[in-house]
Image (spheres, rainbow, N blue to C red):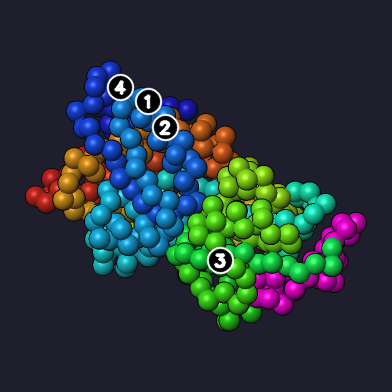
């Protein structure tokens, strides 16, 4: 479906002529959306001649860099609360949705064969369950040949929105996790080894026999990692894919979310993937370089118009049309230059 765009005419003109803006857009932050941002950026450069220089450094790094104004936009999978946006003079909008998935490396056990309940996943990351053949794992996985092997827990070592979604979910489903560890972009992990970025976690899991980790689904697919099935809020074991992520996002009411602050973990629905989330773009309300800001908005508007199939191919969930309209309205009303003139 063609989405309405308040910059469509200007973008069409840009496609027909050499761009007047020669510099690349700069952004930094979340590793969760990096695969789709890279795909969009490649297609956008071919269409417009303008590139995207995006540093996949984790949500914590993205928040720091946009706060310091060293990039045109920051990216975070952990949405900032309205009071934090106000304090730092920022706006945020969701760019894409997807899922965080538990992945494992157990010899002889194929993808989708291991079932995990919310309590079991929390207990593994709390260090309570130490071997793959312990009774709580075996009881959920009859018929699976589980080895008498230590579980090697892998987590993120950097400030991470992927971690935020993962531990936010564990805090919702495990009172023990909530009281002992809690949530945030970084936490004090009870056990395990840390990898930097989704890339680092995927690398550790692929190399360590008996490992379990959590990554954005595109990284699991790209690295051919075995994903687990996870029991959702309705008690159904589900596999991660774009339909399961869409089911989790179906009840999201962005219009009622102050500052577009919305977390999609542990959503109801028999088909919902339990660890679903959006990835957000952060920009300053008052733009010191409005020309750069305008190019950022052109890029994301182009992605909203043309990037849905690319997103679906990587099992991300594109933002629905009504949400795109809300985002565009926010761009018009809240992004201004130093004199108070709208950037768009």
Q: Residue furthest bottom?
A: 179
Residue 254, magenta (yes or no): no
Residue with the mark numbered 4: 15
Whether tag 1 and tag 2 are in contact, CB under 8 A, the answer is yes
Q: Is 130 within the magenta? A: yes
Picture coordinates of residue 211 (x, y %)?
69, 61
Q: Earlier in the sequence, mark 1 or mark 4?
A: 4
Q: CA distance from mark 4 to mark 2?
A: 15 Å
The residue under label 2 is 42
Residue 95, image x, y percentages: 42, 45
Q: Residue at x 36, y 30 (%)?
A: 45
Front residue of this view, candidates 211 and 11 = 211
Label 3, secondary structure: give it.
strand
Of label 4 and label 2, which has the lower sequence position?
4
* Residue with the most extreme left position: 339
Q: CA distance from mark 2 to mark 3?
A: 31 Å
- Give the labeled residue for mark 3: 194
**Magenta residues?**
120-146
Residue linked to disc 1: 46
In this rendering, the label closer to the viewer, 4 or 2 = 2
- Marks 3 and 1 in Cβ contact (< 8 Å): no
Q: Is residue 183 visible?
A: yes
The span from disc 3 to disc 1 (Cα, nearest Å) is 37 Å
Residue at 80% x, 54% y is 107
Report the residue at 28% width, 18% height from top.
16
Q: State which tag comes first along the sequence, 2 or 3.
A: 2
């Amino acid at each position: 479906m063609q989405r309405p765009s308040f910059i469509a005419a200007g973008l069409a003109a840009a496609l027909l002529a050499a761009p007047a803006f020669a510099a690349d857009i700069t952004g930094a932050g979340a590793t969760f959306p990096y695969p789709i941002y890279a795909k969009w950026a490649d297609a956008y450069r071919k269409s417009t001649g303008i590139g995207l220089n995006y540093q996949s450094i984790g949500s914590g790094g993205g928040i720091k860099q946009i706060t310091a104004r060293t990039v045109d936009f920051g990216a975070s999978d952990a949405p900032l609360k309205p009071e934090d946006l106000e304090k730092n003079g920022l706006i945020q909008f969701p760019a894409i949705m997807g899922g965080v998935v538990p992945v494992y490396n157990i010899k002889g056990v194929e993808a989708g064969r291991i079932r995990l309940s919310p309590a079991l996943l929390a207990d593994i990351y709390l260090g309570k369950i130490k071997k793959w053949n312990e009774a709580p794992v075996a009881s959920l996985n009859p018929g699976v040949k589980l080895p008498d092997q230590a579980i090697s827990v892998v987590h993120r070592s950097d400030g991470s929105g992927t971690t935020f979604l993962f531990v936010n979910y564990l805090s919702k489903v495990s009172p023990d996790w909530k009281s002992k560890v809690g949530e945030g972009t970084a936490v004090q992990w009870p056990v395990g080894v840390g990898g930097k970025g989704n890339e680092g976690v995927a690398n550790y899991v692929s190399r360590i026999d008996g490992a379990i980790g959590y990554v954005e689904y595109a990284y699991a697919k790209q690295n051919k990692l075995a994903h687990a099935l996870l029991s959702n809020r309705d008690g159904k074991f589900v596999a991660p894919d774009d339909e399961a992520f869409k089911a989790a996002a179906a009840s999201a009411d962005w219009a009622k979310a102050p500052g577009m602050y919305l977390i999609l973990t542990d959503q109801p629905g028999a088909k919902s993937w339990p660890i679903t989330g959006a990835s957000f773009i952060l920009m300053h309300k008052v733009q010191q370089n409005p020309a750069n800001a305008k190019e950022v908005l052109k890029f994301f508007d182009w992605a909203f118009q043309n990037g849905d199939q690319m997103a679906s191919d990587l099992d991300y969930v594109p933002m629905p049309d009504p949400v795109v309209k809300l985002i565009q309205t926010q761009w018009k009303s809240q992004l201004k230059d130093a004199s108070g003139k709208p950037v768009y």
